[in-house]
Amino acid sequence: MTAPAPLPDISGYSIAPERHWGRWLAVAVILLLLAALGRAFAVGMIEWRYVGAFLTAPAILTGIANTLVMTVATMALGIALGVTTATMRMSPNPVLRGVAVGYVWLFRGTPVILQLLLWFNLALIFPRLGISGVWTVRTVDVMTPMVAAFLGLGINQGAYTSEVVRAGMLAVDTGQYEAAKAIGMTRLLALRRIVLPQAMRVIIPPLGNEFIGMVKLTSLASVIQYTEILHSAQNIYYANSRVIELLIVAAIWYLAVISVLTPLQMLLERHFARGTAGGR
């Protein structure tokens, strides 16, 4: 039997790193595009001194405050309606299920801006609200831009939130429902004490995205004259014709608010994901 041939001596070789020429080319192209875009904004027709001057204008700050108030209020209404509708949707009662399905179908099937306009013009259908002969009020006095925006955005959000909550409830093992029933818990008590706490891990991430989306969705309320960020910017540029500058101011504030809310959402997700692989 012949001896095996000796292995070649590779001690003098060095390991050459792989060249990722495509990546470097892509980076170069992206940097060139960003530089061109930055130069266009820097040397274009934008008057940046107006951006700085109106960034903290009282009207803009009022719009920011109104945006945040409307976001919190509409999300609170949307969550309340969403939990209620999701519970009705999973009820064995066919009437409750039908009402829940109809509500989701109606408000998810029509544009938000259309719903805002309908609420704002409700006086054209019902001139007065209340109980005839007892107490009534003119609808136009009640349905202010703020109330119309609150109802339009909140009720619409409830339809979407109900599907998020329902998905979270379906993610809980059916054995949890059976165990709660076995120890004598009512359906609502089991939902509050056992099902929803476990479902929060699934509910929080999309609900956080919905909250962030609502910050931007409030801009639609400008069509019914609600004074949020975009409406405030529009009122100013109608007077001084600095359209792009004021739109940049609005964009900066939207980005600032979202930049604060995003890490808060991540912390909330981590809190409810404790004990799971995603919460380590």
Image (cartoon, helix red, strand yellow):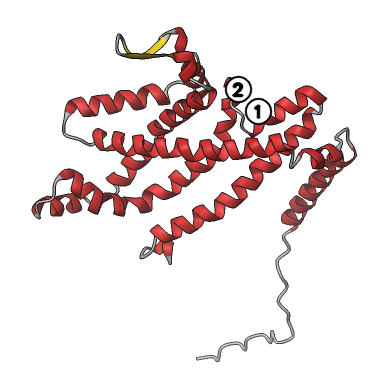
> Answer yes or no: do the residues labelled 2 and 1 have beta carbons within 8 Å?
yes
Q: Quadrant of residue 42?
A: top right
Q: Position of residue 205 (x, y in %)?
A: 44, 49
- Chain-order first, disc 2 or disc 1: 2
Left or right of 46, for residue 65 = left
Question: Relative to 83, does residue 127 appear above or below in the rendering?
Answer: above
Nearer to us in this view, 147 or 179: 147
Q: Residue at x 87, y 36 (%)?
A: 47
Q: Position of residue 74 (x, y in %)?
A: 46, 35
Horizontal side of 41 relative to 202 (left or right) equals right
C-alpha separation, residue under disc 2 versus residue under disc 1: 7 Å
Vertical arrangement, residue 84 with respect to residue 224, above or below: below
In this view, which residue lies farthest toward the front?
A: 134
Mark 2 falls on what kind of element?
A: loop
Q: Nearer the viewer, residue 12 or 221?
A: 221
Residue 130 appearing in the image = no
Q: Amino acid at mark 2?
A: Gln
Residue 75 lies, in percent from the top left, at: 45, 38
- The amino acid type of the residue labelled 1 equals His
Q: Residue at x 61, y 46 (%)?
A: 257
Residue beneath disc 2: 225
The part of the image, by quadrant, that contains residue 247 is top right
**Residue at the (73%, 63%) spot, across then down:** 19
Return the residue at label 1. Answer: 231
Instruction: Name the secondary structure under disc 1.
Output: helix
